[in-house]
Image (cartoon, rainbow, N blue to C red):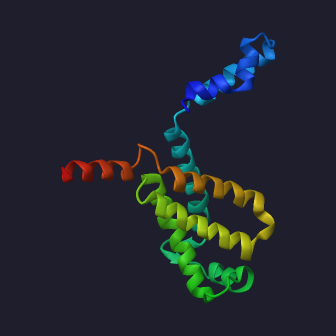
Amino acid sequence: MTTAETIASDPSTRDARAGGGPLMAVWGGLTRAAGCVPLWIVTLFARVGIAGVFWRSGQTKVSGWEITSSTYFLFQDEYKVPVLPPDLAAQLATAAEHVFPVLLVLGLFSRVSALSLLGMTAVIQIFVYPGNWPEHALWATALLLILLRGPGPLSLDTALGLWLKRRRG
């Protein structure tokens, strides 16, 4: 279904055209305008926004190039991620919170980065802070958008794909 068909089938725009009043006309205009926003703008905002969340979290775990002792303490005494030893979990989480956000901003290996951070979000939700589900749901939504729809045309993934396509023939 095209954007025009979607707008035409939307009851709010039909009612506005049929004389539903000024409020319905405004609502119809907003609906039409929202339908014109390209998906690549939404995915760009999702990439940069979620990257900022994880990058800032990663920055709280380091001092310079070193993982802080307080980070190790948190992983041992508060986070208690199952299966992994606390020191390894701290190192993996810190690396993930620095590498994957950079890749998301660049749009390089975006789907792998989104999937990795989605897995991290699931671990945080299930084992660390189960009460923070509204925040984690927002993270998951942005990550799922990137995972399912890709990073958009303003990304190194797209540029690399075009380059490989031209190179092949």
Q: How far across and how far down the image is residue 5, in percent?
A: 59, 26
Please determine whether, in this image, residue 55 is positioned above or below residue 150: below
Question: Residue placed at 48% from the left, 59% from the top?
Answer: 111
Labels in figure, total: 0
- Side of 140 where 158 appears, left or right: left
Question: Residue placed at 70% from the left, 20% from the top?
Answer: 13
Please determine whether, in this image, residue 130 is positioned above or below residue 21: below
Question: Residue placed at 78% from the left, 18% from the top?
Answer: 24
Is residue 60 at least partly visible in the picture?
no
What is the quadrant of the N terminus in the image? top right
Is residue 27 at least partly visible in the picture?
yes
Question: Residue placed at 75% from the left, 11% from the top?
Answer: 18
Please determine whether, in this image, residue 91 is positioned above or below residue 143: below
Camera-side residue: 83 or 164? 164
Q: How far across and how far down the image is residue 11, in percent?
A: 74, 25
Q: How far across and how far down the image is residue 94, in percent?
A: 55, 73
Q: Quadrant of residue 68?
A: bottom right
- Side of 23 where 114 appears, left or right: left
Q: How far across and how far down the image is residue 163, in percent?
A: 26, 50
